[in-house]
Image (cartoon, helix red, strand yellow):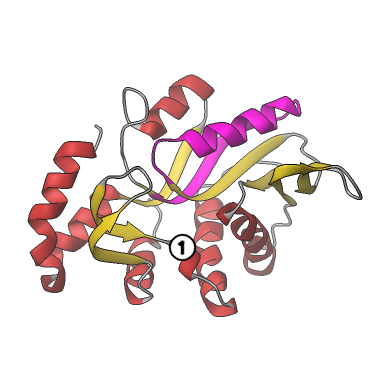
């Protein structure tokens, strides 16, 4: 078990990375919670965030050759996690990320950073439908590389095509999706902390509608 989970939950609550209320998602769904690592926009917060990823990687002994961050949030994540692995765990791993559009001058191409070679660890903030991770896997495969592991801060545990997105990624791409926390952990927060109990019914309704098993 990842033994920093409770610390991470306290971190995302105190910094409002996890909020409860009524939020409209990109999909159009109305959600009683919102998770946004984009709020880690200073040195202290991004250092803390990346340290949880780095601790998970080392505790789980995930094996990979380079870290890959999908544009855009993955760009900051892959670089800060690489630094955290080196500073805190003496593990020196290169990183790369993609551009949304290929560059046709200077350092041309779709990728920035290290060579896309060997086994990638994809890092991102959340997994929802799994579509952005699939795009990254396809990009990596085009370079004759591979991805056996993905690490996100939060697994929404929602349906991909026909079942939970993380399970689909495993069965269709032979890729294990790791998460620091998942939707069940957030539901436990709502049930256990008095200040969030007003959201219990909305959380239960949302999970019964969108949570995949």
Q: Is residue 8 above or below residue 119?
A: below
The magenta segment is 127-154
**Is residue 147 visible to us here?**
yes
Q: Would residue 158 be found to the left or right of residue 148 on screen?
A: left
Name the one closer to the observer, 209 or 156: 209
Q: Is residue 17 above or below residue 78?
A: below
- At a point 62% along the width and 49% down the height, the residue shown is 71
Label 1: state its secondary structure.
Answer: helix
Q: Is residue 190 above or below residue 135?
A: below
Q: Which residue is mark 1?
A: 37
Residue 116 horizontal/vertical position (percent): 77, 38
Residue 6 horizontal/vertical position (percent): 32, 65
- At a point 23% along the width and 50% down the height, the residue shown is 30
Q: Would residue 143 be found to the left or right of residue 80 on screen?
A: right
Q: Quick check: is 145 in the magenta stretch?
A: yes
Name the one closer to the observer, 209 or 100: 100
Q: Would residue 75 be found to the left or right of residue 211 on screen?
A: right
């Amino acid at each position: 078990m990842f033994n920093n989970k409770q610390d991470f939950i306290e971190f995302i609550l105190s910094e409002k990375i996890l909020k409860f209320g009524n939020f409209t998602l990109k999909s159009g769904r109305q959600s009683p919670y919102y998770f946004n690592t984009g709020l880690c926009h200073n040195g202290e917060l991004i250092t803390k965030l990346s340290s949880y990823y780095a601790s998970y990687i080392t505790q789980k002994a995930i094996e990979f050759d380079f870290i890959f961050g999908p544009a855009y949030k993955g760009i900051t994540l892959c670089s800060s996690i690489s630094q955290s692995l080196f500073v805190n765990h003496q593990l020196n791993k290169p990183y790369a990320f993609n551009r949304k559009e290929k560059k046709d001058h200077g350092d041309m191409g779709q990728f920035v950073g290290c060579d896309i070679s060997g086994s990638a660890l994809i890092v991102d903030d959340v997994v929802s439908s799994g579509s952005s991770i699939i795009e990254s896997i396809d990009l990596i495969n085009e370079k004759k590389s591979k991805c056996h592991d993905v690490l996100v801060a939060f697994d929404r545990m929602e349906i991909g095509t026909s079942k939970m997105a993380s399970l689909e990624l495993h069965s269709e791409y032979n890729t294990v999706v790791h998460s620091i926390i998942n939707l069940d952990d957030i539901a436990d927060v709502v049930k256990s902390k008095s200040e969030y109990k007003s959201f219990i019914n909305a959380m239960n309704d949302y999970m019964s509608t969108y949570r995949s098993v």
